Amino acid sequence: MTDARLAFFILALPFLGSLVAAFLPARARNWASALAGLVALIALVLLISFYSVVSSGNTVLHAVPWLPSLGLDLTLRIDGFSWLFALLILGIGALVVLYARYYMSPEDPVPRFFSFLLAFMGSMLGIVLSGNLLQIVFFWEMTSLFSFLLIGYWHHNQSARDGARMALIMTATGGVCLLVGFLLLGRIVGSYDVDTVLSKGELIRDHDLYLPTLILILIGAFTKSAQFPFHFWLPHAMSAPTPVSAYLHSATMVKAGIYVLILLWPVLAGTESWYLIVATTGLATLLLGAWAAIFQHDLKGLLAYSTISHLGLITLLLGLGSPLAAVAAIFHTVNHATFKASLFMAAGIIDHETGTRDLRKLSGLAHFMPITATLAMVAAAAMAGVPLLNGFLSKEMFLAEALEAHSGTLLDRGLPVFATLASMFSVFYSLRFIHQTFFGPPPTGLPHTPREAPHWMRLPIEILVLLCVLVGTIPALTIGPLLDMAVRSVLGDRTPAYSLAVWHGFTLPLLMSTIALVGGVILYRLFGGRLNAVAHSPIIGRLKGRRTFEAVLAALIDGARAAYRLVSTTRQQVQLRLLIVTALAAGSLPFLSLGYSLGALDQTLLDPVFAVLWLLGAAAAIGAATQAKFHRLAALAMVGVAGLATCISFVWLSAPDLGLTQLLVEIVTLVLLLLGLRWLPQRLPDIWRDGHIPFQVGFRRGGDLLLAVLGGAGAAAIAYAVMTRPPPNGISRFFMEQAYRGGGGTNVVNVILVDFRGFDTLGEITVLSIVALTVFTLLRRFRPAAESIEIPDQQKVQNAFDDDREGNAFGDTARHYLLIPRIIMEWLFPVILTCALYLLVRGHDLPGGGFAGGITASIAIILLYMAGGTRSVEARLHIQPVRWISAGLLCAAATGAAAWFFGYPFLSSHFRYLDLPIIGQVPIASALLFDIGVFAVVVGTTVLILIALAHQSIRTPATRRLAKSDPADGDGQERID
Amino acid sequence: MEAVLSLAIGILTTSGLWLLFRPRTFQVVLGLSLLSYAVNLFIVAAGRMRTDAPPIIGKEAVDPALYADPVPQALVLTAIVISFATTALLLVVLLASRGLTGTDHVDGEEEDQ
């Protein structure tokens, strides 16, 4: 028994390989291809090790838990059918890797190619190995994404970019439909598990939502498998490197749609709507693809349309709904993958060795590359359905099915004729492919002189062609058991009796085959010579899929632009108004429906001091609001008063930690804004003369005031309603009970911050650090406005005084300014610093902690700067805020990580008491280390921000330096870190 | 007390919102400061009014009912520090915008009158 966990490795290997390949140097062609080949082969071996399990009819299931609480797991599922598909993906994948090693030019960034290819391989495996519908959609979208990258690999090429974009838009749109379809399916069944869905066929087909579900899933499958009318992206995808075409358009990508159709065939097929939609689409695609293929002049274009046609054939077979047709569909899927991959590779060799893929220029190549010619001829014969090759067998099954009566509709009765006709076309284009390329006179005017390709490049084709022949001659010994296994896992009890023999006697299908072969040859004899002159394929050339696609796309983009212009604005004021209006509406809705009422909680007695405090606070807030435009400094001071009122309220409301922190932050914010004031423009008096405000402006202001008042009233009303209700039972109880027992601290707020919710705090100090670095970076390239560059008036007066006075050196007045207070401020430095450390250390038990301590310490440093001036402080003290920040972050994270070493989750804290001489018993908690990290980060960020802003005043902008070179203005250099 | 605190929150919010709608960058900075006072007070108030009951507990078994709710306080504590950082960031962005565009209008250009 093979371990089911190996299935996970099959899926993970290509992605790992892709990641490694992405980091290889751009020229490492051999390394990248060896890696890719190795990955494909190892995965192949792992897959083969599952053969014995799945061949006995078992399904391998393996779930990797992801979000077990939500019932979401990564489910891997291998049954006979998905095993066969995975075999194709990995087997042909390995051959494509070998081929690509020789196909890709050393000038291309080949490792990137293999990285995409491996990721695509993994996504494709993900589709077939998934045991959950949503997981299938996930990998489905990934194949769209990576096929986009692969098709657009030569991104310097316009047609590659266009083709890639078209493929992405088409298949991703289909992917959305598939997702919705699967969601509906999951809703019908009640589970997204593939096995559960497969067991509920009856329920699904009888459900009201069956038709929409079916149509959505079919759109998904049809876009991916290039079915009419979504087929047009596939020919445009031919601008991809040929190994990509050989892989995507034979065994993978386009077969993903087929895979989903076959997977869900047992539950979705068998209804009238299934028959009508799927069979009709398949037939149309079969005929149109074959017809268009005849008129292609590009080798790969011919193969592309032939692929569309063969996919149509498989879809048609699935659409018929009979088990025997499903067998034929699975069989033809495998056969088509082998011969089409080899044909694409042969086309690639021709392109590689001659420099062109144009059928009109190619001729007589059989003399130059006899081996490739032979291989291509056999593969093309398989495509045409010549006996003794694999294509013949599945085509024979198809013809036999076409003869069977299924529904008695017009479609059903005409099917034998259409099938023969399509087969005839297929013979026609295969013949043209071979005859024009390899026979006739030697070619003239080719970019390169044709020669045989290197042996290793031919090897993949040789293997594939050998398989075509082996399956075609001894099917029962080669494909027989694999096909049987796949068919059984799809059809289960409904598996029909079928025979894989080469010879069934003289039957009607054989006659149809013969008619097709002979007819195709005759058609080619009659019309083959004239084809080179036809520029567009008749009839289908009028469909113009691409033009429609582009028109729809352009209309969508124009519509989006128009809608954007209509409903969007770049004006911040309008946006803010809309935001607040929305918030107001959303906030008042519950009150409109439920009414406003007060709770039962007794109100606290009013303390007159508190009322006076807020009388002041409210006046200050209103004053700030009215004065902020013309009297910035006054407004700032009034905001500070409101802040102090808030701060005192915190203390009143039993939140000493908040009061402390608010007070300290108030100080640094004030310093910050004062530093910023200098760079703001002088406010011109109101532009409305004589106090006459135009109606429009007055209306706008009135509206703003109304909104602001409504917002304020709402906030007050909600606050009041909340405060009068008894508190609910929250998580606070737990924190209170555990703070000392589990966290070793009596200050519950601090214990929450550094212990219970330590991870949040870690995130917050990270945000702080990022903000500080952003501020620092922004200020490095700061360009002040022209009128702010001048030295402030006060300094000018001081300098002029120094100039006039005998014995006064330049700058003396500034140095003596406020001398006594400055000395006191400098002496305060150690005192404040001690306070800061005390706040930090006691934080776990009493109000304080890393935040408060950190801001206090930064205030000490800022005071020093204010007292001594930037230059004199920096001459004596070298503060490196960025180091503080990084040390703090490291300290906090390391404290958290240390818990791992003791086998606890990240940030678990530990505490104990330590007996120190003299001081006595001291609690030591690992949370203190964490708090020290917070402390350092806060010091670093605050100091970095304020100093960076302060430095702007001593920087001499280039403009002023040029205007007058004044040595005392400093060198304009910043030394912060 | 509750009514006074609610009114205070309302007036702070009104002043903050009014300033938020103003066209000059400095007004917006001050508006945000006032608004953050209002929001912080509101969050603490959501823990209900408790005077003289700071969540500083003893070392023995605790009765949570005797103390103010610590959770809103922990939320607001970090909010205060973060609001300093965002004010700084906003201020610097505004200064840079003023340096580049030559105006302190929030849109980086004077409104057409």
Image: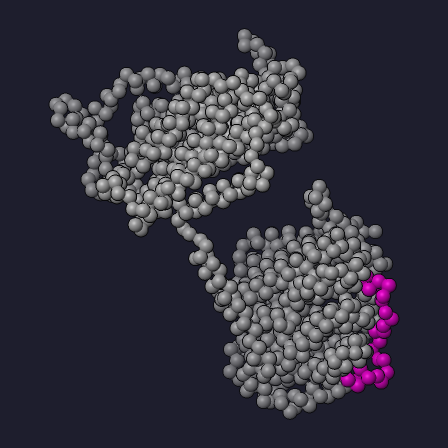
Front in this rendered view, residue A60 or A480: A60
Q: Establish if B64 lies above or below A40.
A: above
Instruction: Locate residue A68, reporting x and y percent.
Output: 72, 43
Q: Is residue B14 magenta?
A: no
Image-based side of A64 in relation to A437, left or right? right
Q: Residue at x 51, y 35 (%)?
A: A766
Quadrant of image for the C terminus of chain A: top left
Instruction: Locate residue A260, reporting x and y percent.
Output: 71, 62
Front in this rendered view, residue A35 or A772: A772
Q: Establish if A438 lies above or below A310.
A: below
Q: Residue at x 56, y 26 (%)?
A: A724
**Residue positioned most to the bottom:** A526
Q: Establish if A370 lies above or below A904.
A: below
Q: Is residue A767 visible in the rendered structure shown here?
A: yes
Instruction: Locate residue B84, reporting x and y percent.
Output: 44, 32
Q: How is the image coloured?
A: one colour
Front in this rendered view, residue A586 or A230: A586
Q: Kindly indicate the quadrant of the structure image that contains residue A427.
A: bottom right
Image-based side of A874 in relation to A171, left or right? left
Q: Is residue A890 visible in the rendered structure shown here?
A: no
| Number of residue marks | 0
Image-based side of A441 in relation to A639, left or right? right
Q: Residue at x 44, y 57 (%)?
A: A566
Q: Residue at x 47, y 63 (%)?
A: A558
Q: Kindly indicate the quadrant of the structure image that contains residue B97.
A: top left
Q: Is residue A503 magenta?
A: yes
Instruction: Locate residue A100, reporting x and y percent.
Output: 61, 65
Q: Which residues are magenta?
A: A488-512
Q: Kindly indicate the quadrant of the structure image that contains residue A829.
A: top left
